[in-house]
Amino acid sequence: MCGIVGAVAQRNVVPILLQGLQRLEYRGYDSAGLVVVNNNRLECIRSNGRVAELATRSAETSGHIGIAHTRWATHGVPSERNAHPHLSGERIAVVHNGIIENYEELRILLAAEGYVFKSDTDSEVIAHLIHSHYARGNSLLDATQTALAELVGAYAIGVVAADNPDQLICARKGSPLLLGVGVKEHFIASDMSALLQVTQKVVYLEEGDVAEVGLLDYRIFDASGKVVERPVHTSELNNESVELGEYRHYMQKEIHEQPQALANTLEAVCNSQSLIPGIFGAEAASTFAQVDSILILACGTSNHAGLVARFWLEEIAGIPCSVEIASEYRYRVSVPNPKTLVVTISQSGETADTLAALNHAKACGHLHTLAICNVPESAIIRQSKLRMLTRAGPEIGVASTKAFTTQLAALFLLTLVLAKQRGKLSAEQEQKHLHELRHLPSAAQAVLKLEPSIAQMAEHFVDKRHALFLGRGLHYPIALEGALKLKEISYIHAEAYPAGELKHGPLALVDKDMPVIAVAPNDTLLEKLKSNLQEVRARGGELYVVADAGTRFQSSEGVHLMQMPEHAGYLSPILHVIPLQLLAYYVALQKGTDVDKPRNLAKSVTVE
Ligand code: F6R
């Protein structure tokens, strides 16, 4: 989704802006642009393409203050005309993430004032609105604050003015924005990865904040306009964590980082002899004591993690659990139960639908909220009472991999903590689970050894147009996740079904051209799954089976095996998804798609 970078410095900021934009490329974009103030003039360059092209076109540009943007089209096609920054006259330039809902009304009002619109975007109204207040003699800060009060919708913005070369104004409401603090220089960005080359000191702006950013200092105003102090954090990210290193794509790197990411996420419990609720926050024990059910809200891959967790929570902790797609829940009239623990799951912590679902749940009277999230200080973390950070490190590939497996690890911990508190876990069972969790990173490492054989298997998929994924029980959500991975990066249409559903319709699709990928752990549903797979073979369907130790599957004509080294019991979904991630990766690689930035998708979906 759109990305913002801005800088005020004594040095030329153009290289900083461009490097920042490159770091934000992973969010997904279709055009890019930047503006600097130079000799009281705005120098603006836009490109309907990659940041590399913008860099070539900006070679002669320099300035000490500037803002830059990568755009992911919402209103108006991807084009140079619709790329940001948007200018009002020669005086005001704005970059914007989010969606302005009342832009049509504002457009009419501004057109009546004589403003001429050059783009089809909702964002351009912000530039003209600020200009119209600035032209009446207000300071840039006042003009921006007044304009923001007239906007309905979500925004993170950066603003500069040609005749104000020492100051940039920024603001956030509903879209992420942070401030980077350097030595006699300051920066703004949508996420910290954009600033790692210049600083690790970061101030997270809160909802409704507006900041006036200069060379030597900055002032932050909260939603009521009062000057506020926000803490300066030192980011744990470093350049290495966002660089590709020896890998061909971020997705491949992130698949390989899973053993370490799991170890980091589980560190606190694995180094301890028993499970404590405190890993979810100081008030976790008292909150958990009050809840009688769980409601999980999330989108996409994070929703799949929730679907796995439902099995664990009901079976191990004996607590009723429902899982809803956040974008559906937020608009649904539901019956709230104040004793429900509302759990949001999100890699980014900024997904607009998940955030809105959380706020909807709170507005319905839900008091107990827990966020499982990979980004510290993200909106979802800040707006939840309890939280657990997955420690996957930055996930840059659009297709989520290590965030998913670490979410599952966190959700398994939640299950165990609740089970223990509800008297459903004996001391012996607790030790057994802890032992298995300690082993999980090395079990994940062993699964990665399947990579060369999966790379070969992927060749069978290159010419396919459709694929079917099957799983049962705990592993049906893994089939869903496998299908999502394949479709989003290889563009092969893929669907997942609980294997028992096959004969109720989808079996009609099975023929020799329909590869069927089955997740086949050695669990109680194995024999039933085997019967389902026979039904596929009998119709000539080619089978690809992710089987683990003890399942007695064998490769044969039309049956291709991905043999997992061991069976991991309840933790099996965390391991079984890894071959499916690798399969999707290698199919996409062989199809030559843009693996890390698949078409039409964005990493952090900060608009509805
Ligand atoms: C798929 C994927 C998306 C995200 C979804 C939610 O690979 O990455 O489906 O899972 O957009 O994002 P977060 O987890 O950031 O809330």
Image (cartoon, helix red, strand yellow):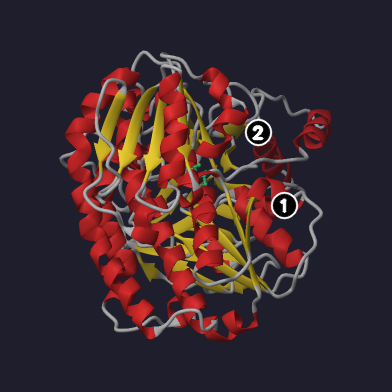
Q: Residues within 10 Å of mark 2 (few under 14, many from 20)?
A: many
Ligand 1 is within 8 Å of the C-beta of the residue at disc 2 = no
Say which residue label 1 marks: 330
Name the one closer to the observer, 286 or 321.
321
Check mark 1 vs ligand 1: CB closer than 8 Å? yes or no: no
Q: Is residue 435 left or right of residue 225?
A: left
- Which circle marks residue 136 in the picture? none
Tell me residue 522's x, y (percent): 35, 50
Q: Position of residue 581 (x, y in %)?
A: 34, 39
Residue 369 versus residue 478 in the image, above or below:
below
* Residue that carries the numbered disc 2 in the rendered image: 124
Give 236 or 299, whichever is nearer the viewer: 299
Where disc 1 sits, the SS reads: loop
Q: Is residue 68 visible?
A: no
What's under tag 2, amino acid-wise? Glu
Q: Is residue 226 left or right of residue 236?
A: right
- Give the CA separation, mark 2 to mark 1: 29 Å
Q: Which is nearer the eye, 138 or 82?
A: 82
Vertical side of 360 occupied by 155: above or below = above
Q: Nearer the viewer, mark 2 or mark 1?
A: 1
Question: In which quadrant of the rendered view does residue 172 lie?
Answer: bottom right
Q: Position of residue 42 (x, y in %)?
A: 50, 34
Q: Earlier in the sequence, mark 2 or mark 1?
A: 2
Could you tell me residue 92's position as x and y percent? 59, 39
